[in-house]
Amino acid sequence: MSPASAVRIAPSLLSADFGRLAEQLAIIEQGGADWLHVDVMDGVFVPNLTFGAKVIETCRRLTRLPLDVHLMVVEPEKYFDSFAAAGASNLTIHFEAAPHLHRQLARIREFGCNAGVAINPGTPVEHVRDVVRDLDLLLVMTVNPGFGGQKFIESTVGKIARARALLDDAGSGAHLEVDGGISRETINRCWQAGANAFVAGAAVYTAPDPAEEVRALRGRCGVQV
C-alpha cells in the first residue's frame, strides 16, 4: 500500500465546464487537488476528439497545478514538443500506441517532462516490465479509454496490485495512477491495491461542491483533511 502522504488527486479537465474554466480550476485548487489531468484524444486511437496544445497553454495560464497530460493518440511523439512548450508537466503515452516505447519515454524526458506509460484494461501489466526503470508514472486504465463517466471495471483492482508489485520489485519510485470510474465508492480499493494517484472527472465536477469532493476522495485514502 502506498503511504497516505503520497496520495495525488487529479481532477479531469474532461468533465469541467469550459464556460467557467477559470472558476472550475480555482475550485479544485481550493479543494487541495494535486494535479490537473488533461485527456488528449485524437479520434483515432480512441473514438473521441478533445484537447490540443492551445487548451494546455490556457490551463497553464489559469492554474498553478501540475498538468498531467494523458495522450490517447496514435504517433504520440508528434505532440511532445508542442505540449511540453505549452506547459505539460507529465506526458503519459499508451503502450498500445507506442511501438518504440523506450525511445519515446526518453524523448519525453528530453523535453523536461515526467514520462508515463498507460495500459488499457486488456493489456497485461507484464508488457511494461522492460521499461519500468524509465517511468515516472504508470497509469492503469480502469475503464476503456475514450469517454468520461464510465463504470469502473472491478477486475482492474487485481491489476493495480500487480502493477504495484512490478514497480516495487524494480525499486521504482514511479507514481501508480488509475483513471476511470474513480469515486468515493471505488477509490479506497484502488489505494489499498497500491495506487497513489487518482484521476476523477465526473465524481468531482458533478458534485454539488467539487472542492469538498476532492477532500472527500483524499479522505477515502486515509488522509486527514
Image (spheres, rainbow, N blue to C red):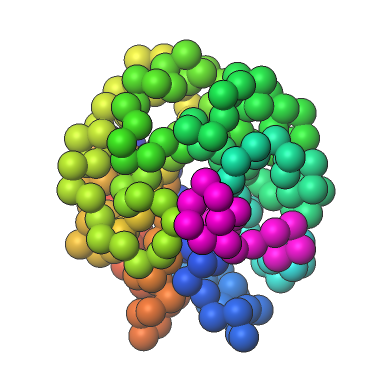
The quarter of the displayed image where residue 52 is located:
bottom right
Query: Can the viewer see residue 186 in this picture?
Result: yes
154, above or below 148, in the image: above
Q: At x 59% / y 73%, what residue is drawn?
A: 25
The quarter of the displayed image where residue 109 is located:
top right
Quadrant position of the C terminus in the picture: bottom left
Asked whether residue 211 is drawn in magenta, I would say no
213, above or below 193, in the image: below
* Label tally: 0
x and y percent of residue 23 in the render?
A: 60, 82
Specify whether 95 is left or right of 71: left
Q: At x 60% / y 79%, what residue is drawn?
A: 18
x and y percent of residue 73 in the render?
A: 58, 45
Q: Nearer the viewer, residue 39 or 187?
A: 39
Residues rendered magenta in the picture: 34-55
Q: At x 74% / y 68%, what residue is drawn?
A: 58
Quadrant position of the N terminus in the picture: top left
